[in-house]
Image (cartoon, rainbow, N blue to C red):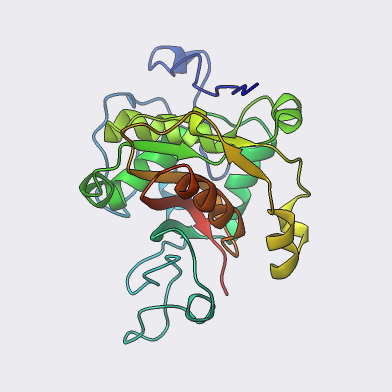
Amino acid sequence: MNTVSHSRPAYAPGDLAGLLFPQRCPLCDRVLPFDARLKAPLPPAFGSDVWVHRACHDRLQWVREPSCLRCGRPLADTQAQYCEACEKRRFSFESNTALWLYRDAARDSVAFFKYHGRRQNAVYYARALCAAHGAYFKALNAQALVPVPIHPSRLIKRGYNQAALLAYQLEKLLGIPCREDLLIRSKHTSAQKALGRSQRQQNMENAFRPGKEPKGIHRVILVDDIFTTGSTLEACSQVLKEAGVAEVYSITLCIAGE
């Protein structure tokens, strides 16, 4: 039987509640000064936001053009279209869009988001993604945002799926529905961060299976936190395409260097 544990946030932050429960900066985890944040407009692309300390924002290493047309990794060669890794390997997904390099402030922030219960970081992450790339995401005309699922045993231990929390915040800003039921994690895999490239690929074999039939869904955007070798997104893309999805794009908060 297919079972899906949903990670849709059960609550939303409130500006008045911030007087009693102050919002923390998603990058340094220190308290932010009180401000009306809920209806604040999105910042300019790559600009500072009311959801983060300005000094912390300035520490981020943003992914800018030129970037690899496949994985989204920054390119040193302005004439190149693909990074060295993507020149050598074919992927099932069309392209990935990443926000930051997986270093320093971004790496630490994602670790707190993923392992230390900082669920509210997803609000800032989604705003930053949409400020930088919202027009592109909307132009894709995708029918669904699909968060990379985690295994039920890990979901019980952690209490939430960080990719789903991010996807639901993106749903609010982009108007694209989040669908956790299209993809199921069927294999409890080892942590990818401890594995090499070939080991990551082996680790992801048969890790996912189709969920609900994607009727009327021809194009989706996968959502995940970190792109390292692309093995996780590749495994998800293969399953979605075998289920009938024609095109798979992806969004990741961070991307590791080659």
Image quarter where the C terminus lies is bottom right
Across and down, in percent, residue 108 comes to 63, 50
Q: What residue is at 68 percent from the left and 24 percent from the top?
A: 159
Across and down, in percent, residue 103 comes to 58, 62
Q: What residue is at 31 percent from the left and 87 percent from the top?
A: 79
Q: What residue is at 39 percent from the left and 61 percent from the top?
A: 95
* Side of 182 relative to 40 (left or right): right
The answer to whether residue 176 is seen in the rendering is yes
Across and down, in percent, residue 195 comes to 76, 62
Figure check: 9 above or below 232: above
Across and down, in percent, residue 86 comes to 49, 75
Total tally of numbered discs in the picture:
0
The answer to whether residue 29 is seen in the rendering is no
In which quadrant of the rendered view does residue 1 lie?
top right
Figure check: 13 above or below 50: above
Q: Nearer the viewer, residue 44 or 153?
A: 153
Figure check: 113 above or below 137: above
Q: What residue is at 69 percent from the left and 37 percent from the top?
A: 186
Q: Nearer the viewer, residue 237 or 129?
A: 237
Q: Nearer the viewer, residue 153 or 77?
A: 153
Q: Nearer the viewer, residue 1 or 138?
A: 1
In which quadrant of the rendered view does residue 70 lie?
bottom left
* Side of 104 relative to 74 (left or right): right
